[in-house]
Image: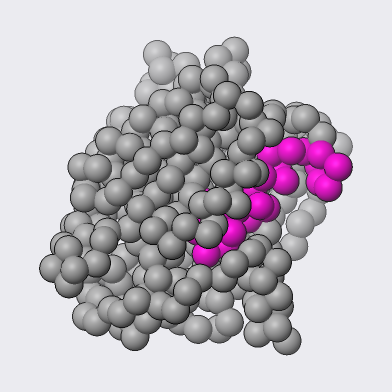
Amino acid sequence: MSKVKVVPIADAFKDEIRDYVQFCNKEGYKPPKLVGILATSDPAASQYASWTGRAFLSDGLRYSLITVSDPTHVEGHLKELEKDDDVSGIIIYYPCFGQQPSYSGESMDDYLRDSVPPQKDVEGLCWLYRKSLYSNVRYLDDDPKRKCVLPCTALSVVKILEDMEVAKKSNPEGRRMEGLTVTIVNRSEIVGRPLAAMLANDGATVYSVDIDSIYKFGNGKLERMKCGRGKEECVRESDVVVLGVPSKDYKLSTSWVKPNAVVVNVASYKNYDESTILSVPGVRVVGMVGKVTVKMLERNLCRLHRQYRMKDVRGGEDGKEIGEVKKWTMVAAGMATIAAVVGIYNARRR
């Protein structure tokens, strides 16, 4: 029974980020720049923005924050940032509109996620990267030098599980989570759903639990659980339990957690009773993933900078490619609009 410290896990990614920044500086290129847009008073979003800025500047990356009082102005900023060749990545700190419905989609926040241009989407939440994730497509245009961007928080959970040797990192892609049963509480579009797909794509059996339903992700299929099988049964069966309920009132029942399980909390509130969870024999608890999430954000920014701002790239294995880059030159002028990006990608896929 123990608490897992994530700072050493986050620090393990510092070298590759700093190696890339050092190369850019040595060759006379500006390091990648991220611009954040904060259009909410939500304390968790503000804290994430603060963490982002400190971490990026500490690692030599460039970062600036646009604070917007009216979320209806966010789209205008996106259009300006898309045209700015000095900007390598964009992040919106959600929620902006919350669940306010949209004329063109389920909610206005969903609309904004799809408005971020793919070549600058450090969070991997736009339609192109979502489609690739849910189709288990790992590379753009089948080019191994052009990886799809994955959502930062979900990716941080995967990296933590790999570091804890819960995942079998020595296995080939698509099989590193084989034999694991995972329950994820909260099927949000930012964390819960993409994480379920990522773990299932790597071979795990995943129960995705939300307020009104439970779905099973596995073997490329999505199955709604029948009545009689509830959250308790799923958790009791699970080797890993991921908690992401954005409420201070929600607590997982400790009695459901089986011995030697891993419990990962991705919510801004602790979704478990700390005084009892560590009494479960062999349990390991990850209380926060924020520091690893920020490193994944930095990593995604460097990847986008490499794939869209440079050419003649030679990389290595996942996790090492940034530090192993040998030669870089500036890429031709960026695409002007999201529509143009969509057209190019669709044309290449045919």
Residue closer to the observer: 201 or 188: 188
Residue 197 visible, this orientation: no
Q: Position of residue 9 (x, y in %)?
A: 27, 47
Q: Is residue 1 left or right of residue 126?
A: left
Quadrant where the N terminus lies?
top left
Residue 210 visible, this orientation: yes
103 part of magenta stretch: yes
Q: Position of residue 93 (x, y in %)?
A: 52, 36
The residue located at (67%, 53%) in the rendering is 114
The residue located at (60%, 72%) in the rendering is 137
Q: Is residue 162 left or right of residue 178?
A: left
The chosen color scheme is one colour
219 part of magenta stretch: no
Residue closer to the observer: 190 or 210: 190
Q: Position of residue 194 (x, y in %)?
A: 61, 51
Residue found farthest to the left: 26
What span is in magenta?
Answer: 102-126
Quadrant where the C terminus lies?
bottom right
Q: Position of residue 44 (x, y in %)?
A: 48, 25
The quadrant where residue 255 appears: top right
The residue located at (30%, 72%) in the rendering is 321
